[in-house]
Image (cartoon, rainbow, N blue to C red):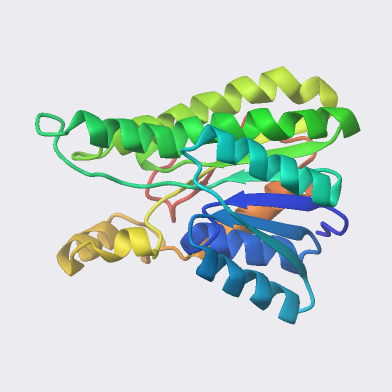
Amino acid sequence: MSLTGRIAFVTGASQGIGRACALKLASAGATAVVAARNQEKLTELAAEITTAGGKAAAFTFDVNDEEQVKSVIKAAITQFGKIDILINNAGITRDQLVMRMKRADWDAVLQTNLTSAYLCIQQVIGSMLKQRWGRIINISSVFGQMGQAGQANYAASKAGLIGLTLAIAREVGSRNITCNAVAPGFIETAMTAGLGDEFKQNAVKQIPLGRVGSPEDVAGAVAFLASDEAAYITGHVLNVNGGLLMG
């Protein structure tokens, strides 16, 4: 499953799933262009990739700032000549029951999790259309498929990513560009670290495989969808949830 010669742009790459995706794509031969707000963590990640014999470049940006998105992706395309693979992974949570949820928390989650994906797709699509090859992979969530109490904003944003995925897949399929989503279940990341032990134990009971997933579980699915082996898959939502949601 070689990605040699491909340029992969990963948002939210400083930690968790984004970091694991960057490492996996780089190990398959892609140049990992990692982007997030934390320059220190990005520098460490790029160094880890290059030390292992891979290729990487780090760009600091805030996905909520449209001008930063435009300038950073333009700079990446200028440096590497193209972007072949886009991983829209940046995401946040601002959990609260809907009756108490502040408008600012709704807007922040929708902006970071959904609007940023639209902005990044818009900026890379020209490069992909020009070469008639591209892979767009949006990191959704099982909660965008089944909902979750106290996460109306997060679930809505992740469900929106699935709708965005399907629309883009239809728009650009004729140009040999695929657009798919990966929907993780419970994954051990900084985002889930704050959940209580009792909550985690109850969650594991609902998972047929009997364990919480790892960022590497998700990264493997992402690398597959980014490869030539997945050339005839588009508009698909690949569940990586240990069986938590089936069908």
Where 66 falls versus 63 (above or below)?
Answer: above
Q: Give the quadrant of residue 195.
A: bottom left
Q: Would residue 50 be found to the left or right of residue 62 on screen?
A: right
Evaluate whether residue 247 shows in this view: no
Q: Nearer the viewer, residue 166 or 54?
A: 54
Q: Nearer the viewer, residue 148 or 34?
A: 34
Q: Give the quadrant of residue 181.
A: top right
Q: Give the quadrant of residue 74.
A: top right
Residue 25 in the image, given as x and y percentages of width and height: 71, 60
Q: Nearer the viewer, residue 48 or 17?
A: 48
Residue 35 in the image, given as x and y percentages of width and height: 59, 54
Evaluate whether residue 2 shows in this view: yes
Work out which residue is located at the far bottom of the displayed protein and give it: 51
Work out which residue is located at the far left of the displayed protein and give it: 100
Q: Quadrant of the N terminus?
A: bottom right
Residue under the image location 19 percent in, 40 percent down: 150
Q: Nearer the viewer, residue 54 or 235?
A: 54
Residue under the image location 52 percent in, 69 percent down: 41
Q: Would residue 54 be found to the left or right of residue 5 on screen?
A: left
Where 83 falls versus 155 (above or below)?
Answer: below
